[in-house]
Amino acid sequence: MRVEDTQPPHAERPIRALPGSAAVEIIDQRWLPHELRLVQLQDVNSVTTAIGDMWVRGAPLIGATAAFGIALQARHDASDAALAAATAQLQQARPTAVNLAWALRRMARVWRPLPPAARAAATWAEAQAIAAEDLAVNAAIGRTGLPILQALAAQRAAVGSGPLQVLTHCNAGWLATVGWGTATAPIYMAHALGLKLHVWVDETRPRNQGASLTAWELGRAGVPHTVVADNAGGHLMQQRQVDLVIVGCDRVTARGDVCNKIGTYLKALAAHDNGVPFYVAMPTSTLDLSLDDGLAEIPIEERSAREVTHLTGRDAAGQLVEVQVTPDGAAAANPAFDVTPARLVTGLITERGLVAAQADALRRLQPGAAAEGPST
Ligand code: MRU
């Protein structure tokens, strides 16, 4: 099989436009891995809730879902005031992933110049275009990342045996996008092409997107993997059991600082200390050239303390139960993202090629879509 012939390893879509343009269907990810539950969203309020309460999550999927939120609003009331209010409401649903603002800006460029009567059809078409492009962008990220995996697998084969060992954090898989995933796209392609690999999946407390979502995806695709506690990564790297780390990102600044799920920074530090390559899969829609110093400037979402003090899972009878893991009344803090300084990033795997986490390289990459072609 050639890489061009590989297909996303999933028939479902995390978001799907329904015929008639009156609703979108999403996978309600709060129920995974125990249940694949589909939900229809028909208005901007339900879209805002779905983003804020993480029925959908992952930077690219947040952006695509917000775009449909604008299109759904345009069906009901396409006035300037109504669409501006919908944009403001969606914008505050989650603060960190810049794909949200990117998608809303792109939608505004479509609806603003049009008379209200033309806005519903045009915004629906644009939201569909954003979704379709995300799939193409992620396939391109896969093609950029594949040779990196193949080269590291060849290095491993030269000194010993066993599969290529990849470590990932959180879920930057197909559930976080419209399809393929970002960090997972090269993994899925390599697996489809017969490369022997194994993925260490960080559980990713507090919400466990690794344990519940990435493990679910990889398992369904037949990709060998092992879930590890978040704190295991450093040890695995010291034991030479990790050939590379690949993670996704929620916002990358002009100088290459990478904001991603809380705990990513510690993995990058451990990778640096152990000489393990640390790659970030980045669609250019996640690049925020308006910011420079990620630590000082990126807004970090603070989520409910209950995500830390409690855990949800399935009991022996198959029922979903929530249990408390901290003493009654214990204070808990829940910063949802952290910033990995550019100096710890080996490279950014983008739809336009492998890019250094450096200002000059990133300035040449304007945020945009795959259709715009490679930057020169
Ligand atoms: O809080 P989440 O689940 O939305 O966080 C997701 C991540 O941090 C992902 O790594 C990131 O959004 C990239 S998804 C391709």
Image: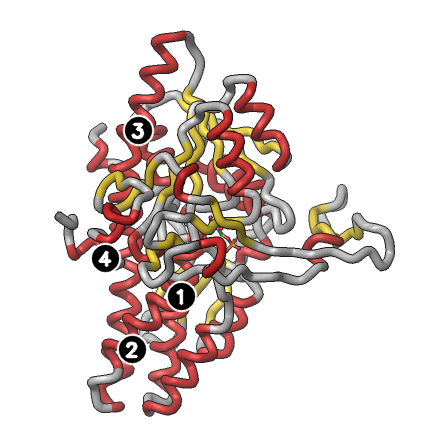
x, y percentage for residue 167?
Answer: 48, 31
Mark 1, ligand 1, within 8 Å: the answer is no
N-terminal of the pair, mark 4 or mark 3, is 3
- Residue 366 - label: 4
Residue picked out by circle 1:
100
Q: In what element is the residue under mark 2?
A: helix
CA–CA distance in space, label 1 to label 4: 16 Å
CA–CA distance in space, label 1 to label 2: 12 Å
x, y percentage for residue 90?
Answer: 45, 74
Query: Cβ–Cβ below 8 Å for labels 2 and 4?
Result: no
Task: Classify mark 4: residues with Cα within 10 Å, few (<14), some (14-19) or many (20+).
Answer: some
Q: Hey, what amino acid is under mark 3?
A: Ile
Q: In what element is the residue under mark 4?
A: loop
N-terminal of the pair, mark 1 or mark 2, is 1
Q: Hey, what amino acid is under mark 1?
A: Leu
Residue picked out by circle 3:
148
Relative to 317, does residue 238 appear above or below in the rendering? above
Query: Cβ–Cβ below 8 Å for labels 2 and 3?
Result: no
Residue picked out by circle 2:
108
CA–CA distance in space, label 4 to label 3: 24 Å
The nearer-to-camera label among 1 and 4 is 4
x, y percentage for residue 136?
Answer: 25, 50
Q: Residue at x 44, y 79 (%)?
A: 88
Query: Cβ–Cβ below 8 Å for labels 1 and 4?
Result: no
Task: Classify mark 3: residues with Cα within 10 Å, few (<14), some (14-19) or many (20+).
Answer: some
**One can see residue 38 in this view:** no
